[in-house]
Image: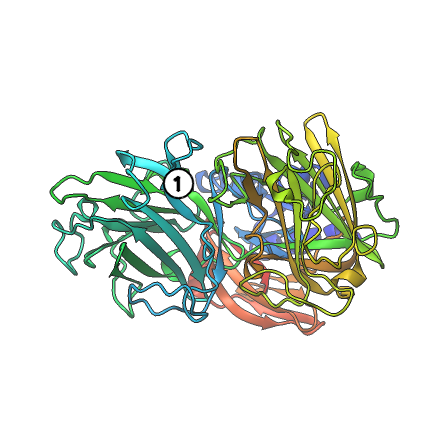
Amino acid sequence: MVQSQNGELFQHAKAAGEGTGHSTRGRVRSPSQLDRYGLESLTLETFCSETMKTKETKSLRTPIAFYPPLRPVPSKAACCLAVALGVLALIQGLSSAAPTLDATRTQYALKINPPVIDGEVNVLDPDEWRFAAGNSGYWHVFPDDKGFAADGIRGGELANGAKPDSIDDLSFKIYAGFNDRNLYVAVVVRDEDVQTDTAAADSKNGQTWLDDSVEIFVDGGNANAARWAKGQVGGQFVITANNAFREEEAGNPGFGETAAWFAKTARTDVGYTAEFRISLSILGNPKPGDVLGFNVAVNDDDGGGTTAETQLTWRGKTHEPVTYGNLVLGSQTYTMFKVTTPPNPDGKINPTEYAGATEIRVNAKIGVVYIPGADDDLPVTDLEYKAWAVHDNDAIYVAVDLTDEKISTDQSNDEQKPDLPTWEDDSVELFFDVDNSKNFGGGTAQAAGVFEGQYTQTHKGFFYDGSPSKEAQKGVHWFGAGSLTPSGYQVEFKIPKTSLGSPKDDASIGFHIAVNDDDGVGDYSHVGWTGQAHHEYTYGTLIFSTKPAGSTGPGPKISAVNFANGAFGWTLQTTAGARYDVEYSQDLKTWQVTQADVAGTGQPVSVTETDAARKARPFGFYRVRVK
């Protein structure tokens, strides 16, 4: 018996094939071959034998072999199982793998308490929309009066009709949250002439697009189809300003307070507001870390009649999912590996210093753009950045490499000044929530010598001396430097752990990265990693791993597989205290939980498929997710 994990799994798979009357052959794919797919290791690929080459089995060979476009399970370390004709293949997911994002626009829905769906959007109540994504004005679609946007719309797109005359003519803000059962979306519309003369109040599947109305589009599997078609997961959910609703393009899943989805609107002094609750069960049962295709459209029917004057969208064309933006459920997590030889934070990034560290990549398509800033549709050549972080016993080290075609530091020039507004120059900002309070605002006062909040500097090493605190001295409580490169600039930070409250190994704190881009046009653009500056509840999570750089995460290990006597199951080598969900899919897009909340004991745990229908299918996919 080969003693490697690959060899053991190969024997398990071969035994499984023999147990079902099929022979198998397999080979191990090298790690270098798998890196291009974003996977750490594929331990076995299997094929049907020559004697099984029927028309049906030929069509399954690519899924069995797991060639691209297979994507890793996002955000959580996980194992995936694929069962095809009684043959098993295993994929081990990467630790803190970033979600796979389309190059469109991106936002992160945040976990919230379920709001009351009555049409009244309360952004101050923590039991309503207080901690939803967008609740600081950063998710905003409005007419541009500064000439930044090519189509005249900031934060969104002009989908149909004429550009609104002003923010009061038509503009809107979006808020998004979720819990274990539902997706929640609120839209606050400014519209000085609200019209609802076509679809009758509270009516179903009328011509809602001819009235003032809000439309939510969700591509549940993020399948990116060119055109929407019946039977796809998700669809279009519409509510008008007089509460006529439309669900036909979502397959009529059922509308009502206790039904699959529900929505309500309410009038305001400046327009109207809309609230939506959409069951995750009709969106493919996505889990935290999963990505939904997402769009919001608002129709404006000034003056009434049978023609709507304007339609604005957040991202994309209304019935073309391939054009939608990304809505990620939950903020991102970054696992910071531990090193014995720390980087030299001299502002010149040496790749060997961060070898094996996970890369963060951010631009205006896959990052979170602060819309009230300047241009929100920056090309990659204008602004993109990559970041890495590691830690040792004493400090954390963060490196940021920026592509920026125009470097501007006109606020600082060549002098460090008191109260220097570095955010108005090209600069990098780090944010920490060291007590994991997830405040609505930014950092708060901590014990003496501990500073949560914002650390910032330009490529010249200049910084704002008021953040994280006037007492936080550069060169004492934190260190950093920067330098120019042929394509932009680089910045490195060293922050002693004592300045962050002395976090222990395997601890986690709130964390965010943002970059300011000052192209000298009178304002600046601001693009963040996973949340919004100075709003701790939106930050991602930074984990102080004890593992060396390049390590995989704490995913469950498959130690045995059982196909005997018609049974199907496997044994998980679990971690004590961890919890796992077992999920099943037939297309690697839509997943359903088959066994929830399996408790890790630190010992092998047996998991068995009991559903006769799934066992009878010729192929299917399973994954085990760390909760």
Secondary structure of the residue carrying tag 1 is loop
Q: Residue at x 29, y 70 (%)?
A: 258
What x and y, as percent, mark residue 448? 77, 68
143 left or right of 384? left
User: Taking 59 as reference, is 590 above or below it?
Assistant: below
What x and y, as percent, mark residue 579? 61, 69
On the question of residue 467 being in view, the answer is: yes
Q: Nearer the viewer, residue 321 or 441?
A: 441
On the question of residue 318 being in view, the answer is: no
Number of numbered labels in the structure image = 1
User: Taking 130 as reference, is 9 above or below it?
Assistant: above
What x and y, as percent, mark residue 338? 80, 55
What x and y, as percent, mark residue 293? 42, 46
Q: Amino acid at mark 1?
A: Gly
Q: Residue at x 75, y 66 (%)?
A: 501
Quadrant showing the N terminus: bottom right
Q: Which residue is mark 1?
A: 156
